[in-house]
Image: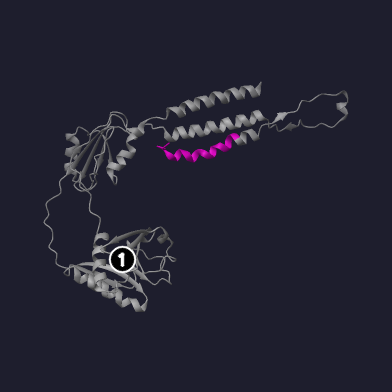
Amino acid sequence: MTSSYPWWWLALPLLLLPIWWHRQKRQRLDAQFLATARFLPAAAPQQLRVWQWRDRLLLLVRCLLLVALIAWLAVTVLPWRGDTVLVDAGADHAWAARQIADAGMDGARRIDLPPDALAWLRHNEPDWRAGARLLIVAREGQIGMPARAPQFGHAVELRVQAAPNVPPAPATSPVSHRVALSATPERVQAWRALFAAFGQAGDGAQRYVIAGAPVATTELIVWDTPTLAPPADWRAPHWWLGAGSDKAWPELGKATTITINGVTLRYADSARGRLWTSAAFPPQDAETARALYEAWRLLAVAPAPVYPAPSHKFVMASAAADAKPAYWIAWLLLALFLLERSLTHARRS
């Protein structure tokens, strides 16, 4: 069972209310007046706490009734949105206004375009009423088209503003990559020689800047001092760890092993970045260094951008799967309510 509004589960502490109510139940003792009672001092009537099996059953039913009510509120979808326009804040305002007017949605509510708009819309689509229309206006490249076009239960149209043709700037200087290096004295030179070779392998188009500590733009940290722990504030997208670092990095216990160009690498993700380790760190010969360079070009390359979505009218599905109401919880609520009323009447009689 998936919650459409999971914050309703925060109401579970309300289960304490029926428990408190039952613990407060009192039953007054029957009082019999005696002829000699006038010689005794006055005393307030006494009450006795009664805890019978019928009360326990009634308490259980009332708790289940509250749980079922909270679950029904958490999964029940109450559509409240009407016609809506998702607007990219960076799009040209005049162009966006023309697209909205052309679609006949001048009176529709407008909201800012969320990140990963198509996935967000698919997840929140049950919030829109049946028959509502949605229009997305955005710049080219702001929305990526997935491999399979999503289907929606509403009429969804995407209009994309074409990007201006800007000639690419000529490359006048090599691309710099910042690397933080911390290694034992006998291995520092080997690491520096490796990155010097990396810079020459790409015809000078890549340049590796070695530093003793990372900065905000550091792409790689080489930590080849297994006996020492790195500072807690060191962060980078990638870490190269020397052999024997498993004890200092428990994340490597679940590392994945891959072999590229004859170089075996193990990697695992951590809160500080992706960890890489290999018995070939640092390489001891030119052939291993070349294989490592080729492997690293394949692994550390920036992820390819998703295919930019063009203007498109999405296919309207017959119904949204997530919008099905939880009828069985409603019937359960009714049954528990009738049972609770019956037990309450039986306790009073």
The answer to whether one can see residue 112 in this image is: no
Instruction: Say if 199 sits above or below 258 in the image.
Output: below
Callout 1: SS:
strand
In which quadrant of the rendered image does the N terminus lie?
A: top left
In which quadrant of the rendered image does the C terminus lie?
A: top right
Residue 226 x %, y %: 41, 71
Instruction: Say if 301 sits above or below 154 in the image.
Output: below
Q: Which residue is mark 1?
A: 220
Which residue is outermost to the top?
349
In this picture, which residue range is highlighted in magenta?
1-18
Residue 173 x %, y %: 16, 68
94 or 208: nearer the viewer? 208
Q: Is residue 200 left or right of residue 214?
A: left
As shown in the figure, which amino acid type bears the numbered disc 1? Answer: Leu
> What secondary structure predominates along the stretch shown in magenta?
helix
Residue found 24% across the figure and 73% down from its top = 286
Quarter of image, res 342: top right
